[in-house]
Image (spheres, rainbow, N blue to C red):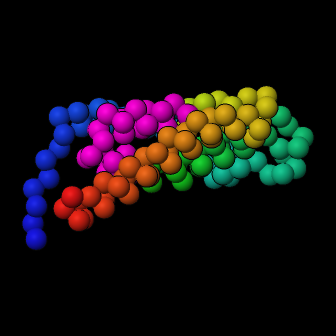
Amino acid sequence: MPFTLVLPDSYGFVLAAATSTIFVNSLHMLRTSKFRKASKITYPNAYATHEQAEKDPAAYKFNCAQRAHANYVENQTSALVALLIAGLNFPVASAICGATWAFGRTLYLYGYTSSAGPKGRSFGAYFAGAADLALKLMAVYTSYAIATGK
C-alpha cells in the first residue's frame, strides 16, 4: 500500500537541528584532540591507561574528553532518527527538542572535561536526556500514526 510522504513546511527547522549535531561532533573531536596532544597519549591508544590517568591530570582529562565523545557518538544516531521521524508530525517541537539535545550534549562535553570530571556531565546529561525522551515519544506517536493511517 504506497503512500506519499509530504514534508511539513517547517521541516527545514528539523533539518537545521539535525545539522547542528554534526558541528557538536566536530566540537567533540577538536576538544578531544586538544586534550590528546596535551596528554601526549599517542595513537593508536584510545585512552590513557589507569596508571597514566592517576599520575597525570592531562591524561585524566583526555580520558574524560574521549569518553564524552564516545558517549556522544553512541547516542547521536538514535537521537537523529527520533528527530527526523518525530519531525514529520511535530516539526517545530521536534526541532526545538533536537536543538536542545545538541545544546545539552555540548554542556555534557564541557562539564565532563571541566575540573569536576565525570560529575560535571550531569547537568548536560539531564538536559539532553529530557529532550531525547521527548523526541523518542514523539517518534513513537508519529510512527504509529503513519502505520495506522491516522
Q: Is residue 105 magenta?
A: no
**Residue 59 in sight here:** no
How many numbered callouts?
Answer: 0
100 and 64: which is toward the camera: 100
Q: Quadrant of residue 36?
A: top right
Residue at position x 29%, y 38% in the image = 91
Residue at position x 72%, y 44% in the image = 63
Does the magenta stretch mainly form a helix, a strand or a loop?
Answer: helix
Q: Is residue 31 above or below residue 146?
A: above
The residue most toward the bottom is 1
Residue at position x 77%, y 38% in the image = 119
Q: Is residue 59 left or right of residue 133?
A: right
Q: Position of residue 109 (x, y in %)?
A: 62, 35
Q: Is residue 91 magenta?
A: yes
Quadrant where the image shows the C terminus: bottom left
Q: Is residue 20 left or right of residue 148?
A: right
Q: Position of residue 105 (x, y in %)?
A: 55, 37
The magenta span reads: 81-104
Q: Is residue 93 left or right of residue 134?
A: left
